[in-house]
């Protein structure tokens, strides 16, 4: 289990570093001079800065739409391998180009460390480091077990059960009864799912209970970007310059801002299963609405006066933003959007959900340079209104999924479920173990007779 967590973390590092390194890169003087992106000096610099971020998010959108097919066609491990290879190649091209989470924190501090360097190494080195994490992940892919649910879909039942026993290995359960019960629930649920459809994208948008899942998943990921978190991250140097801090100090503040996310994500791991996904997101979006209101007030006051106290308060509210986002929204949205879909539709459903993340990021980050230049703090009003509105949507329409297995969540959307393991008593669990053993013995007998 620790091995799985470690290599999955490399996946997070791969994405986070690549997504965040642009923030410090846009604050590197050598990069801006090399690509003629100095605002006030080079023509169309503001528009080109927006396009730079927009192109990244467009690539993410296309990747999100493709990953659903790849995950089902090439397996979960196979799609990780393909994506990691693309990241390595892409990172290499960026570092050598003459055109153009913990990972977030690392990217910020790497940018800070390279700021004093002279020449193009100032920005090439941080971009080149993008290849390290996906390269490690490529190696790690060969040590990761395949998804047992995907194996079950491919009728590789023995392998699926073996993976579950490996994941749930416990000296207190040497026979692996828990793994066998979970496998039984998965197998029975998969039989029900197969009778409901063939797992196509069309099925996701034509059946009401599945369309509800798509809308909820898409809104979850889109709303996360509607907090303005990527605008603050990617244009942090510009934002801190607006409150009186520039150069390496602004890059240090940007790095410090994303470093808060490490503690925030740890808080998520401690409490998201206790408080619940929806409640956690309600707390997060409410908190972000409040700190953004404080940020807007500070920025409006700074337009008419210079004040160290108000500038410090503005920075405090920006750090409050990442505190709420990283602890209550960041990881929680990924958890929620992935678990609401049934196994046979999960890859494609999450694919459509993630498109909401990149579509939101594309809109907000590409518009940000022009918006911040033209209307300044008023751009934040969009994020305040949308974050507040989503609190109401969460309260009224989003079902809670905590303490339910992936198979049991289907009940929340009106689908039939085979076994409810979360509600089973010890006595019923023992009876289920006996029934499963009897069923397996019968199957073995039938198989033996067929061979004879």
Image (cartoon, helix red, strand yellow):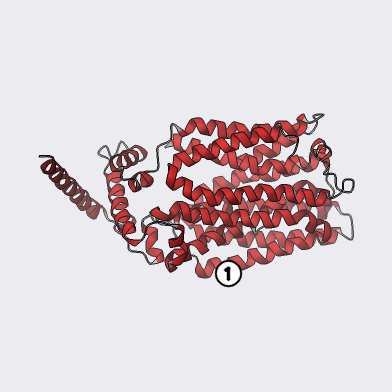
Q: Does residue 331 show up?
A: no
Q: Is residue 37 placed above or below 130 in the rendered structure?
A: below
Task: Give the total number of marks visible in the rendering.
Answer: 1
In what quadrant of the picture does the N terminus appear?
top left
In the rendering, at what x and y percent does residue 248 appear? 80, 38
Q: Is residue 286 placed above or below 366 in the rendered structure?
A: below
In what quadrant of the picture does the C terminus appear?
top left
In the rendering, at what x and y percent does residue 105 appear? 65, 40
Give the residue drawn at x 54%, y 40%: 83
Q: Does residue 95 show up?
A: yes
Give the residue drawn at x 79%, y 52%: 47
In the rendering, at what x and y percent does residue 237 appear? 78, 46
Q: Is residue 436 placed above or below 210 in the rendered structure?
A: above
Disc 1, SS: helix
Q: Residues within 10 Å of mark 1 (few under 14, many from 20)?
A: some
Foreground of the two, 163 or 95: 95
Foreground of the two, 192 or 178: 192
In the image: residue 443, left or right of residue 30: left
In the image: residue 245, left or right of residue 253: right
Rendered image quadrant of residue 328: bottom right
Give the labeled residue for mark 1: 392
In the rendering, at what x and y percent does residue 292 appear? 71, 60
């Amino acid at each position: 289990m620790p091995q799985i967590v470690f290599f999955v973390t490399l996946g997070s590092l791969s994405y986070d570093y690549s997504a965040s390194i642009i923030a410090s890169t846009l604050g590197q003087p050598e990069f801006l001079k090399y690509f003629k992106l100095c605002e006030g000096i080079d023509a169309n610099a503001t528009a080109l800065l927006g396009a730079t971020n927009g192109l990244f998010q467009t690539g993410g959108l296309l990747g999100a739409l493709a990953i659903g097919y790849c995950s089902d066609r090439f397996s979960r491990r196979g799609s990780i391998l393909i994506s990691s290879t693309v990241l390595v190649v892409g990172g290499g091209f960026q570092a050598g180009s003459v055109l153009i989470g913990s990972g977030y924190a690392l990217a910020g501090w790497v940018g800070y460390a390279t700021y004093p360097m002279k020449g193009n190494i100032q920005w090439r080195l941080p971009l080149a480091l993008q290849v390290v994490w996906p390269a490690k992940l490529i190696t790690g892919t060969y040590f990761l077990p395949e998804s047992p649910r995907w194996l079950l879909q491919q009728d590789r039942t023995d392998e699926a059960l073996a993976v579950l026993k490996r994941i749930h290995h416990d000296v207190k359960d040497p026979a692996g009864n828990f793994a066998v019960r979970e496998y039984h629930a998965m197998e029975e649920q998969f039989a029900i799912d197969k009778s409901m459809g063939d797992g196509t994208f069309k099925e996701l948008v034509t059946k009401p209970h599945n369309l509800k899942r798509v809308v909820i998943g898409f809104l979850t990921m889109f709303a996360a970007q509607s907090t303005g978190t990527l605008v603050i991250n990617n244009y942090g140097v510009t934002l801190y310059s607006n409150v009186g801090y520039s150069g390496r100090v602004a890059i240090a503040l940007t790095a410090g801002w994303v470093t808060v996310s490490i503690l925030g994500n740890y808080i998520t791991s401690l409490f998201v299963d206790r408080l619940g996904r929806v409640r956690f997101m309600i707390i997060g979006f409410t908190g972000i609405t409040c700190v953004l209101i404080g940020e807007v007030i500070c920025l409006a006051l700074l337009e008419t006066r210079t004040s160290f106290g108000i500038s410090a308060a503005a920075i405090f509210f920006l750090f409050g933003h990442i505190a709420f986002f990283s602890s209550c929204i960041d990881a929680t949205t990924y958890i929620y959007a992935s678990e609401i879909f049934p196994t046979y539709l999960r890859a494609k459903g999450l694919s459509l959900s993630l498109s909401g993340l990149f579509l939101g990021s594309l809109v907000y980050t590409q518009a940000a340079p022009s918006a911040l230049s033209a209307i300044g703090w008023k751009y934040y009003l969009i994020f305040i209104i949308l974050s507040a509105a989503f609190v109401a949507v969460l309260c009224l329409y989003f079902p809670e999924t905590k303490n339910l297995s992936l198979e049991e969540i289907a009940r929340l959307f009106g689908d039939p479920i085979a076994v409810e393991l979360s509600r089973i008593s010890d006595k019923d669990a023992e009876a289920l173990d006996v029934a499963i053993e009897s069923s397996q013995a019968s199957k073995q007998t039938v198989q033996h007779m067929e061979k004879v």
